[in-house]
């Protein structure tokens, strides 16, 4: 069964080992340094520098861009799916759940957006996918507004302390 593990930065090593992940997507602000877990090979680690904002960046803030989302889609479609894919951001609440939804739809375009997003909510009461990433992903994946509408339907997640990793199964 194909699984995506979504994690806050503080727990990536634990989650990589626990779930046997060998590939990882990191969505982090440029100034946030961290160490890649040893079980993740450098060539199977995608680092995307962006801030967790839903508007065009100002000053030093980098908003999610189309190039970021294209990279998520390309990485996901290249993922061999023999082990879970680990996706993380600072707290595991906004950027990484959005990237998980985008990756899931990239590998399973036949998936129903609302069913997938409801499965995300069932897996995490805290997830609040970044709306800018979702809108760009919706467009690039040709979802015709279905992904945006599905994320809007589940609404904002519960307040989180950034310590609640979860898994998103690709099983129906």
Image: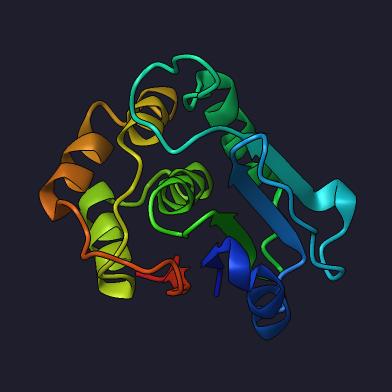
Residue found at x 27% / y 48%: 113
> Which residue is rendered at x = 46% and y = 50% of the image?
108
- Display colour scheme: rainbow
Number of marks in picture: 0
Percent position (x, y) of residue 56? 39, 16
Is 50 placed above or below 37 here? above
The image quadrant where one finds the C terminus is bottom left
Residue sitting nearer the eye, 49 or 42: 49
Q: Is residue 152 left or right of residue 34?
A: left
- Residue 66, horizontal then vertical, whole percent: 51, 20
In the visual, does 16 lie left or right of 44? Answer: left
Q: Position of residue 94 (x, y in %)?
A: 39, 49
**Residue 127 image-quadrant placement:** bottom left
In the image, is 17 to the left or to the right of 169?
right
Question: Residue 81 placed where, x, y %?
Answer: 67, 62
The residue located at (27%, 39%) in the rendering is 147
x 72%, y 43%: residue: 46
């Amino acid at each position: 069964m194909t699984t995506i593990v979504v994690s806050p930065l503080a727990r990536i090593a634990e989650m990589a080992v626990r779930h046997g992940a060998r590939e990882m997507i990191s969505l982090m602000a440029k100034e946030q340094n961290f160490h890649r877990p040893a079980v993740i090979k450098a060539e199977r680690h995608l680092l995307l520098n962006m801030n967790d904002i839903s508007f065009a960046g100002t000053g030093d803030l980098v908003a999610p861009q189309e190039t970021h989302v294209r990279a998520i889609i390309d990485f996901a479609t290249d993922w061999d799916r023999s082990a879970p894919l680990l996706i993380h951001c600072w707290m595991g609440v906004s950027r990484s759940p959005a990237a998980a939804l985008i990756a899931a739809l990239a590998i399973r375009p036949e998936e129903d957006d609302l069913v997938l997003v409801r499965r995300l909510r069932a897996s995490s009461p805290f997830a609040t996918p970044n709306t800018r990433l979702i809108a760009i992903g919706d467009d690039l994946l040709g979802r015709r507004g279905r992904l945006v509408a599905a994320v809007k339907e589940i609404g904002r997640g519960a307040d989180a302390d950034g310590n609640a990793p979860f898994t998103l199964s690709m099983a129906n």
